[in-house]
Amino acid sequence: MCLAIPALIVEKEGNQAKADIGGIVRDVSLELVDRPAEVGDYVLIHAGFAIHKLEKEDAEETLRLMEEVLK
């Protein structure tokens, strides 16, 4: 089973980015993302790669549901 987590891109340099995942910032590759992603965009992160660009509302709803489950 695979799990991809929504993250907010906070810095970007070429195909590398720093993404905020619940307050933890990780280095991620943007080489596999399906659409161009910029600072301020949400992406799904899996195994260190951004694989899909998300709409802000969808990402925030997913994060809210994940937080609710983890309570």
Image: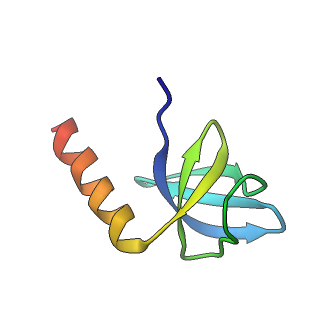
Residue positioned most to the front: 34
Q: Is residue 49 above or below residue 23?
A: above
Q: Position of residue 46 (x, y in %)?
A: 58, 40
Q: Position of residue 16 (x, y in %)?
A: 78, 59
Rendered-image quadrant of the C terminus: top left
Q: Residue at x 59, y 69 (%)?
A: 10
Q: Residue at x 69, y 50 (%)?
A: 28
In screen coordinates, is 34 left or right of 5?
Answer: right
Q: Position of residue 24 (x, y in %)?
A: 49, 50
The residue lying toward the viewer, choosing from 52 and 16, is 52
In screen coordinates, is 29 left or right of 50?
Answer: right
Q: Residue at x 38, y 62 (%)?
A: 59
Quarter residue 56 falls in: bottom left
Q: Residue at x 49, y 42 (%)?
A: 4
The residue lying toward the viewer, choosing from 23 and 51, is 51
In screen coordinates, is 54 left or right of 33?
Answer: left
In screen coordinates, is 52 left or right of 56?
Answer: right
The residue lying toward the viewer, choosing from 28 and 31, is 31
Quarter residue 64 falls in: bottom left
Residue positioned most to the top: 1
Q: Position of residue 42 (x, y in %)?
A: 51, 66
Type of colouring: rainbow
The number of numbered discs placed on residues in the rendered structure image is 0
